[in-house]
Image (spheres, rainbow, N blue to C red):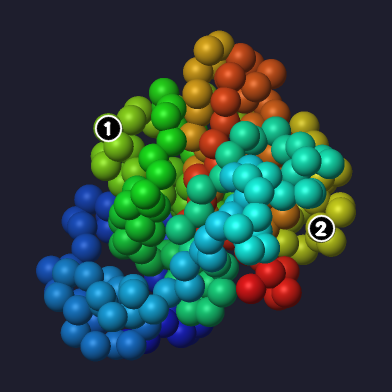
Amino acid sequence: MSILPQNKGLQGAAYRLWRRVGRPLTQDCLLCAASSGLDIVCAACAADLPRLQQPCCLRCARPLPGAGGEICGGCLSEPTHYDRTLAAFRYDFPLDKLVQTFKYGHRLALAAFFGEQVAALSERPSADLIVPLPLHPERLRERGFNQALELARPVSAAWRMPIAAGSCHRVRNTPAQADLPWRERIKNIHGAFHCSDDFTGKRVILVDDVMTSGASLAECARTLKLHGATEVTALVVARALPKDSG
């Protein structure tokens, strides 16, 4: 069966059981429904997913015109708190449907697929540890899992890099960023994170599923740097772009 909204997936205790039992031995591709063996997305559909256009701004991953420079004009005029962004895909069809199925349809096997795609990026950042963007405890109870942590697991395994899963916390349960205009998102997320560990001298990879405005990642990166981090790289599955960005 291809991905459709009617699949409500696993929730709460059922998700934890899924983690113990594991995924099925064979399955159909979520996009074309063809038998794909062990792959949740078949090789042909994976090859057709919308890869992020190059060259991109090193800091925010927006595509640059022509050969371009290394940093876009927006990041030069308003520098972000994260130092670099790496993304595998554009947040566009059908990748967007896969992400939504992962987060809201609870298809946790997609975490391994996405993590493998991100870990296979040609530029592996130099870093000391991985921090998944935290969810507020209330949101975590509702969803049953933190998508950023699930994405961080395969990256950690591929890059042999530790995950600091409990070092950063979301202390404000803010309205969903997706429901707000871009300019309101910075104000909405300010002060939402707290670090309980010392990151002095550490280079951190901050993981999330999608970067849209980048406000949540920037605020968490700001918090990490207030606690001593020297460099923060945002690592995401997909970068959402204005329609005229190509």
List x then y, in percent, for residue 151: 41, 49
| Tag 1: amino acid | Arg
Q: Quadrant of the C terminus?
A: bottom right
Name the residue carrying label 1.
Answer: 160
Question: Which residue is under mark 2?
Answer: 182
Nearest the viewer among 127 and 150 is 127
Local packing at callout 2 (Cα closer than 10 Å; few below 14, some 14-19, many 20+) is some
The residue located at (69%, 18%) in the rendering is 226
Q: Write the residue at 38% across / 51% down.
A: 121
Q: Position of residue 95 (x, y in %)?
A: 48, 72
Q: Taking 95 as reference, is 185 above or below it?
A: above
At a point 39% along the width and 78% down the height, the residue shown is 48
Instruction: Work out whether residue 106 or residue 141 is closer to the camera in this orientation and state it.
Output: 106
Nearest the eye: 98 or 52:
52
Up/down of 56 relative to 92, above or below: above
Q: What x and y, as percent, mark residue 236?
A: 51, 51
Q: Quadrant of residue 39?
A: bottom left
Tag 2: amino acid: Trp
Q: Is residue 77 above or below residue 193?
A: below
Residue placed at 26% from the left, 77% from the top? 42
- Per the model, the C-alpha gap separating discs 2 and 1 is 35 Å
- Vertical placement of 188 versus 113: above or below? above
Asked whether, in this view, residue 28 is left or right of residue 151, the answer is left
Label located before the other in sequence (2 or 1):
1
